[in-house]
Image (cartoon, rainbow, N blue to C red):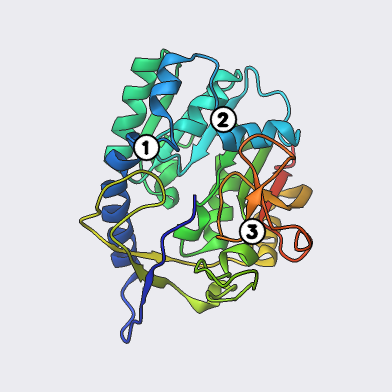
Amino acid sequence: MITPSIEKIRLEFPMALDEYRAVNRDNWDDRVPIHLDSDEYMVQKFIDDPEHISEVVQFDLDNDELGDLRGKSLLHLQCHIGHDTISWARLGANVTGLDFSEPAIEACRRLVTNSGTPGEFVVAEVFDAPAALDNRQFDVVYTGVGAICWLPDINGWAKIVAQLLKPGGTFYILEGHPMMWSVSQDDHGHQIVLDWPYFESAGPQGYEEDTTYAGEGTLEHKKAFNIPHGLGETIDALLQAGLVLDFVHEHKALPWQAFPMMVKSDAGRGLWKMPDGKEDFLPLAQSIKAHKPE
């Protein structure tokens, strides 16, 4: 789905990071009921069809990124309303989801009850995850699309990931490519126009919109702040945290239509790509797999 055009907030006086987090949490709390009723998240289908999984997890399967997770403990950081988390549970993982939004976690717990798919869900900020989870460690730490752009410190995030992994455990992220996030979402025909920063040093990027990317409804808390993280910054953070890279993949397709120029792809279900002749112009997604040494 194309994200609506947004008006950037030009900030003359930076806020404290706790204030950014509070603004973002209020914004995401407002999104929960809208997303629960949306066609994009298909919550009712998860309830009606015990084999249904999300398009994002299907993307992972189609690209054979994570392999067989049956019987493994999986922690999903920033799980939102749990559709990807529940999908991994249906593929055999013992799942725990964590998110800073209490309404989102309440929705996850209802989905567990209504779908009959087991899962544990915890309310906490990512940087508070070890304490919130009693310092447990997991076979897999997973992060999905549209997550790390809400975090202020990619190096601190990587240290948390490493702390949450068992020795020998696997970290995996599927995320929009930071170059893709830098591109304007307005309609510029077939021109690729850069409109957002690429590097974390740019700091929080404020914007305001009263709608969200999935479903129909109006947000009461319209302001939000993203923080960019370049691909090199993310890779280096994982390395500095002591993880060992298994692969870094850049993908030419996404499970949603990020820009008006994008067209449906023949490569898989629900995927979108750049138009013919521009497939090699812009990476659309990235996936990184790493492991914690024994």
Number of numbered discs present? 3
- Within 10 angstroms of label 1, few (less than 14), some, or many (20 or more) residues? some
Q: Mark 2 points at which residue?
A: 74
Say the numbered circle drawn on residue 184. Answer: none
Residue 67 on image: x %, y %: 73, 28
First in residue order: circle 3 vs circle 1: 1
Identify the amino acid type marked 1: Ser
Q: Nearer the viewer, residue 244 or 3?
A: 3
Q: Name the residue under label 3.
A: 177
Residue 128 on image: x %, y %: 40, 48
**Foreground mark, 2 or 1?**
1
Identify the amino acid type marked 3: His
First in residue order: circle 2 vs circle 3: 2
How far, Cα to Cα, is label 3 from label 1?
Answer: 25 Å
Residue 14 on image: x %, y %: 34, 80
**Foreground mark, 2 or 3?**
3
The quadrant in which residue 44 appears is: top left
First in residue order: circle 2 vs circle 1: 1
210 versus 199 height, above or below:
above
The quadrant in which residue 62 appears is: top right
How far, Cα to Cα, is label 2 from label 3?
Answer: 23 Å
Q: Name the residue under label 1.
A: 38
How far, Cα to Cα, is label 2 from label 1?
Answer: 26 Å
The answer to whether residue 167 of the structure is visible from this angle is no
Secondary structure, mark 2, is: strand
Marks 2 and 1 close (CB-CB < 8 Å): no
Identify the amino acid type marked 2: Leu
